[in-house]
Image (spheres, rainbow, N blue to C red):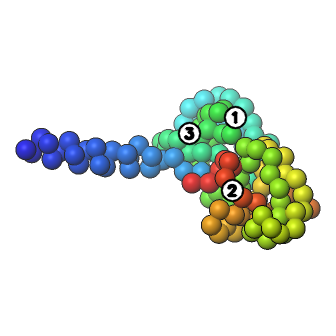
Amino acid sequence: MKKLNFLILLWFFLPLNVFANNTFLSLKKDKVNVRYGPGFEYPIKYIYKKINLPIKQIDKKENFRRIIDFKNNSGWIHVSQLKKVNSIIPKKDKILFSKPTNFSKPLAKIEKGRVLLIQNCKNNWCKIKTGNFKGWIKIEDSWGLN
């Protein structure tokens, strides 16, 4: 009976541990080094040149976070280069609306893959800013939110 209780507890709590590190963050600067490993002694794998780009943290070791991006590129970034998520990337083309409803005035077409800065969200809508446009989009089929 003790073994059964242990297995039930393990099954119940294991998913929390598996997904605890899977959180979205954004790049703090417009030039961020991504490394092969969790330390400055590891060589640079590639460099991001897009501030506010949303990335997903999949692991952590001391002050480094292993990340994966929208295109499934992965590597390690120092925590000083990361901040709380404040952006999303639509996976499909979207319409930007003046209010959080499909019946409001359409303002612009947002192409998939564009970085959108989030101002606030309610229900399935987020008020975003991109370039000279501000408005609301449905966040379904978007990458970057928990």
Choose the circle earlier in sequence order: 2 or 1: 1
Q: Where's residue 101, x and y in %?
A: 75, 67
The residue carrying mark 1 is 71
Residue at figure coordinates x 17%, y 45% from the top left: 6
User: In this view, which residue lies farthest toward the front?
Assistant: 103
Q: Three-letter amino acid code at disc 2?
A: Ile
Q: Where's residue 40, x and y in %?
A: 60, 37
Choose the circle earlier in sequence order: 3 or 2: 3
Pointer 3: residues within 10 angstroms few (<14), some, or many (20+)?
Answer: many
Q: Three-letter amino acid code at disc 3?
A: Arg
Residue 136 in view, yes or no: no
Quadrant in the rendering for residue 84:
bottom right
Residue at figure coordinates x 44%, y 49% from the top left: 20
Callout in the foreground (3, 2) = 2
Q: CA distance from mark 1 to mark 3?
A: 15 Å
Q: CA distance from mark 3 to mark 2?
A: 25 Å
> Along the line of sight, which residue is nearer the eye, 54 or 48?
54
The residue carrying mark 2 is 139
> Along the line of sight, which residue is nearer the eye, 140 or 43?
140
Give left or right: position of 108 versus 91.
Answer: right
Helix, strand or loop at disc 3?
strand
Pointer 1: residues within 10 angstroms few (<14), some, or many (20+)?
Answer: few
Pointer 2: residues within 10 angstroms few (<14), some, or many (20+)?
Answer: many
Q: Where's residue 130, x and y in %?
A: 84, 58
Residue at figure coordinates x 84%, y 46% from the top left: 111
Helix, strand or loop at disc 2?
loop
Choose the circle earlier in sequence order: 1 or 3: 3
Q: Where's residue 22, x and y in %?
A: 51, 46
Callout in the foreground (1, 3) = 1
Q: Compared with residue 81, is residue 61 higher up or lower down, i.e. above or below?
A: above
Q: CA distance from mark 2 to mark 1?
A: 18 Å
